[in-house]
Image: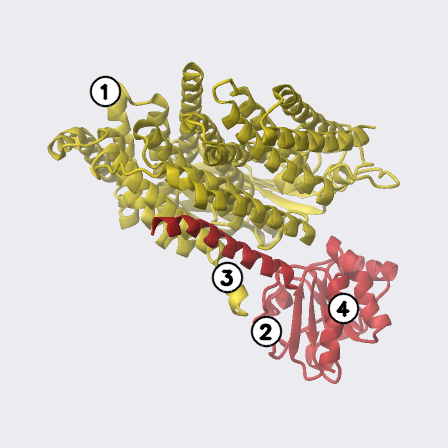
Chain colours: A yellow, B red
Amino acid sequence: MAPTLGYLSLWLSLFFSILQFLISLKNKKLKLINISVHGLLISSLISFFLLMFSYIISDFSILNVFQNSHTTKPLIYKIAGVWGNHEGSMLLWILVLTIFNYFIFKLHNEKNSIFILKALETQALITMGFILFTIFTSNPFERIFPPQENGLGFNPILQDPALAIHPPLLYVGYVGFSAAFSIGIATLTSNEKVPWYNYMKPFVVTAWTFLTIGIALGAVWAYYELGWGGWWFWDPVENASFMPWLLGTALLHSLIVVEKKQSLQTWVLLLSILTFLLSVVGTFLVRSGILTSVHTFALDPSRGMYILAFTFLLATYSLILFGTKSKKYFNNNYFAFFSREGSILINNILIVVVCSTVFLGTIYPLLVETFTSNKISVGEPYYNSTAVLIMIPAILIMGVGPILSWNREEKSKTLKKIFPSVLLTSVMTLLAFSIYQTYSLVGVIGIILSFWIISNNLVLLLKKKAGHSGGMILAHLGIGLLILGITGSSVWQEEKIIRMAINSETKIKEYNIIFKEISEIKGPNYIALRGNFLVYDDSKNIVTKLKPENRFYPVKNNFTTEASIHTNLFRDLYIVLGEGNFKDGWVVKIYYNPLVVWIWIGALVIFLGGIVSTAKNLKKLKSSQ
Amino acid sequence: MKKKLLKFPLIFFLSILLVFFYLLMIDRNPSEIPSALLNKNIPKFEAESLFKDKNFISSKEFGNETTLVNFFATWCKPCLDEHVYIKRFSDEKMIKVIGINYKDNPKKAIQWLKKLGNPYSNVALDKNGRIAIDWGVYGVPETFVVNPEGIIKYRHAGPVTKKIYKKINLIIEDNK
């Protein structure tokens, strides 16, 4: 019953999206628009929750549930299982599209009618495309006969709380940019004079905020679950989320310039289009199987062809519109290089360069394969020596940008303005290095950049000068903390891989680690070997007990490692239990990861800043209406 | 000048999509890594055989005819899926197939072959994974085509599917 209804409901959403598209095309019958927007939202909610229901009751007459679930799976992972696979995640994608569709509709009033209807038309087109794709290539409600006794289970590596909420947050990010895209298209096609940037901004801030925390949770998952001691691997799929984030960042900041100065409008329109197109290209790269990465979805060539055709349609439509209609948004308000808008523009350019570098690295193996018969892969060294390097000036400017005035800044005044933060940065840096006394060029640069951002924003916070948004200060502070964590964990990480017998001892930095025992334990749907490690510091005081696990999931016949981590504000101690036996001992990987926790704190602070800023922008938009 | 610039994003984007289109159209497997051993002699090795009465000495096993080498394990689900094709090589195509039992329990392997049928002329036991390392295998199953001169002509990582089965047959035809 549930699967039939769910499938029907999916067709119903297709109907409503077509209805919305056709009616908004003609710009009339507001009542019908009202019906289609609500109908679309409700029908996609129904199909999404019916699939979730089928997962919860373990309805193994549905192929998708059979392939991805099992009765022994804990409830939270049954629910998360809905979007832990390709078909179900498309349903979530559609749901988020229709929610944003609803919010665009909510902005409608007499004054902006044609403009909002134009945006709804594009949004309906995008939604239609994704529903058609889901129905014809990835139907989550497909049945199997006869119904199965039990499911094949869920990839155990995905059983992680961070990963359970990672996709929904990420999709709010990707899909949020679809609203910016639709508003950008509406701006290009409608001739009405509306402050379109005021409409676009809350969507961009929301999308950016959620994309940030979504990416961060992906990194948390990689750090805790993969057991490789790191949290970012420049994997194509990570890049696929990082590129829209970069362009989204540029979009967010140049929107502020448009708001204040009415300049850069053409540029912002282009960014709004490209950001969403890159999100769709990212989806293509992940789901078509054209690249290999740690994120594998069940692959089917017809899917790749469909998304490619759809991307082609969106790209041609939007970029032709941009090529022909964006001229009217050109203006010649040239502005001073040395001003707040000047700093934003320079940073925009740097961010776009970083994004292009990452894009090149991601597709370079494909280009090489197309034009030669060689296969190559592009890894961390490339990104470290290109993208990371270009970010250094961007971060320097980011620190000083918000302090500068709009229009034109007097150079003599600037020096006075930045003096406190220069002083603070120097003091903090000297203090940090006199305590730790470990030097490396990259480390020093990273720490200075981090303290530079932090002190500039602390100064702003103390001054509480009017005109500085609290959300911005928070988000920038978060970036400063993030850089601190990234620098610490990548420059001063120490790694030790040894074979340890029971009761043997090893040393990493100031810690002595004793391998006490190994025991067998039983979890809800796995059995595991659990090592028991005692950690002592220099003065022989016990610091912590670490218990890494080596889990075996019988349903999937799959092993996973659970790293055990002791965190404090200065460092993580990270132990992974490898293979071994009682006779020869076990392979143990021990990492000393300085400052990792600041990455997570930083991301959280950025997220909070984003939320504050979203609320403020929504309020502003409401009061202007 | 400006007008032309505005068309640039379109041209750029479409050319990227064209590359993607080409890659989707051609027959390719993105997880396929060209083996460093391709067109080279097989790595020599000696090992215990799964069948009690035999020993496994690679120099005696290869040569004279085209041979398939199949790395497998009973704990590996895709190995079970591909087994039907491996059997078709030996039963229908009369091709010599050598199995390499990777990090497995020999008793289970014997039971497994009794139940599913044994396509292998001989099976080497790779208890600690050394043979797999020498062959550059990074996971089971993997299948190699070795020509009568003992030179590796093809490597497939992952289970043999219908498509791969046909492809391997073509490669065997070419190397006869």
| Tag 4 and tag 2 share a subunit | yes
User: Residue at image x 67%, y 40%?
Assistant: A85
Query: Horizontally, is A387 left or right of A186 in the view?
Result: left
Secondary structure of residue under mark 4:
helix
Please say if A503 is above or below A17: below
Does residue A144 appear to the left or right of A621 in the view shown? right
Judging by the rendered image, the residue that carries numbered circle 2 is B37
User: Could you tell me how far apart the alpha carbons at marks 4 and 2 are, in whole angstroms?
Assistant: 22 Å
Residue A389 drawn at (x, y percent):
32, 50
Q: Is residue A520 visible?
A: no
- Three-letter residue code for mark 2: Leu
Q: Quadrant of residue B65?
A: bottom right
Q: Are marks 4 and 3 in contact (CB under 8 Å)?
A: no
Alpha-carbon neighbours of circle 1 within 10 Å: few (<14), some, or many (≥20)?
few
Q: Amino acid at mark 3?
A: Leu
Compare residues A550 and B42 and report the one nearer the observer. B42
Mark 1 and mark 2, same subunit?
no
In this view, A220 is above or below B14: above
